Image: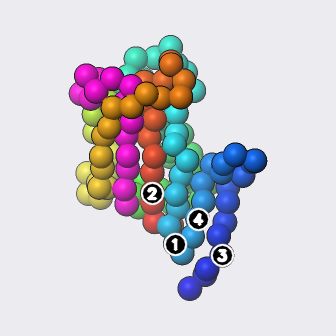
Amino acid sequence: MNKQITRLEPNLRMSEAVCYQGVAYLAGQVPTDTTKDIVGQTQDVLSEIDNVLGRLGTNKTKLLQVQVFLKDINEFEGMNQAWDEWVSPLSPPARATIQANLADKNWKVEILVTAAL
């Protein structure tokens, strides 16, 4: 088994993703357009997750675990609306949703993903 650690877009602080032993660990993905509501920001983040997973040669059907961080837990239903349209119903991951103070006051959602390669 390959024991090499591979990093995608590393900088001095972090990497966009780290791959080890057939598993991809993505950095928290955040919205690029903070003017959108929770549905739009979640769609934005999920699109970026698709992008990063694709660059690693995997996709959302290989998700293992997802952690969703919401600025306001009262927006849980809106986040789930976007999530339910996106997630593969035949291979949903283990998931947790947590209310959190996010690093940018305009972010409504941040999503952390672990996926098989």
Q: Which color scheme is applied?
A: rainbow
Vertical order, 46 against 95 (above or below): above
What is the C-alpha distance between the residues marked 3 and 2?
Answer: 17 Å
Residue neighbourhood size for the residue with mark 3, other residues' Cα within 10 Å, grouped as few (<14), some (14–19), many (≥20) = few
* Residue at horizontal 32 percent and vertical 37 percent from the top: 98
Q: Is residue 100 left or right of residue 52?
A: left
Vertical order, 42 against 6 (above or below): above
- Where residue 47 appears, as percent x and y from the top left, is 49, 38
- Any part of residue 91 in sight: yes
* Residue at horizontal 75 percent and vertical 48 percent from the top: 11
The residue singled out by tag 2 in the image is 114
Q: Is residue 42 left or right of residue 58?
A: left
Q: Nearer the viewer, mark 3 or mark 1?
A: 3
The residue singled out by tag 1 in the image is 22
What is the C-alpha distance between the residues marked 1 and 4?
Answer: 7 Å
- Where residue 63 appears, as percent x and y from the top left, is 39, 57
Residue neighbourhood size for the residue with mark 2, other residues' Cα within 10 Å, grouped as few (<14), some (14–19), many (≥20) = many
Vertical order, 65 against 38 (above or below): below
Disc 2, SS? strand
Question: Which region is colored magenta?
Answer: 64-77
Q: Earlier in the sequence, mark 2 or mark 4?
A: 4
Asked whether 59 falls inside the magenta stretch, the response is no
* Residue at horizontal 50 percent and vertical 19 percent from the top: 105
- Where residue 20 appears, as percent x and y from the top left, is 57, 70
Q: Are marks 1 and 4 in contact (CB under 8 Å)?
A: yes
The residue singled out by tag 3 in the image is 4
The residue singled out by tag 4 in the image is 19
Q: Quadrant of residue 56?
A: bottom right
